[in-house]
Image (tube, helix red, strand yellow):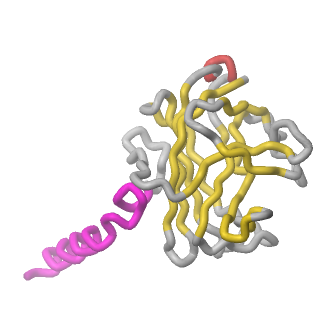
Amino acid sequence: MGPSQRAIAVLLLAAVGCAGSGSSGGLPDADPNRPDARIPTCDTSSATIGRCELAAGGDCTGVPDEQRVFVPLAPGDSVPMVIGPQASLMFVLALQTTGIYAGDPDNPASPDNPNVEMTLLLDSTQRMAHYRGRPAFTVVPGNPDLLGTPGLFVVVEGSASELERRQITVVAELTDKDSVERCGTIMFVAEE
């Protein structure tokens, strides 16, 4: 076997060894906004997707130091579109799960924080937005086994009038520093 054949064999073995490492079978796309990028799936839900609400009532807006809480979503629930501090149209989502390494809530840049990716699909098929970040998770009050992060700001393109009453499917994928994976999916309706 020549050098070029060995290189090909090594690449093939590496690809086989990596297959199935994600919740939808494969490595995440380097550019998830590419038109031909893989659309993730979640076969067994192990994370709950919700929306963000202010502890005092009202919608989260992205203003620093907001007191945010997790509001669980049922299929078909409405999620408000908000204009953030930088004048961007976005959905403010939230995530809860169990059995992961939570990360460091005092250091938003910590590499120990879980890697979270959310893909938003318009009408279940058209990729419309992608969130990628490393938020820390904290213990949910009253439930020491449950961890959550209540403010995931997913910026979307287009206008609120174009998205009003449209169905949006979100697929969330999470991997912690110990390679523990969680995922969840839900369909919601955009509300202006």
Count how many numbered circles sit on residues in the image. 0
Instruction: Please provide percent x and percent y for residue 170.
Output: 54, 42
Q: Residue furthest left?
A: 1
Q: Residue furthest top?
A: 161
Q: Residue at x 60, y 38 (%)?
A: 74
Is residue 136 rendered magenta in the image? no
Quadrant housing residue 160: top right
Q: Residue at x 62, y 19 (%)?
A: 162
Quadrant housing residue 83: top right
Q: Residue furthest front?
A: 142
Judging depth in this view, the residue of 124 and 154 nearest the camera is 124
Judging depth in this view, the residue of 179 and 53 nearest the camera is 53
Instruction: Quadrant for the C terminus, please.
Output: top right
Quadrant housing residue 10: bottom left
Which segment did they paint magenta?
A: 1-28
Instruction: Quadrant for the N terminus, please.
Output: bottom left
Instruction: Please provide percent x and percent y for residue 121.
Output: 50, 35
Q: Residue at x 62, y 74 (%)?
A: 101
Instruction: Please provide percent x and percent y for residue 45.
Output: 48, 54
Is residue 20 rendered magenta in the image? yes
Q: Residue at x 91, y 44 (%)?
A: 56
178 horizontally vs 23: left or right: right
Q: Is residue 8 above or below residue 84?
A: below
Instruction: Please provide percent x and percent y for residue 131.
Output: 60, 49
65 horizontally vs 83: left or right: right
Q: Is residue 38 above or below residue 143?
A: above
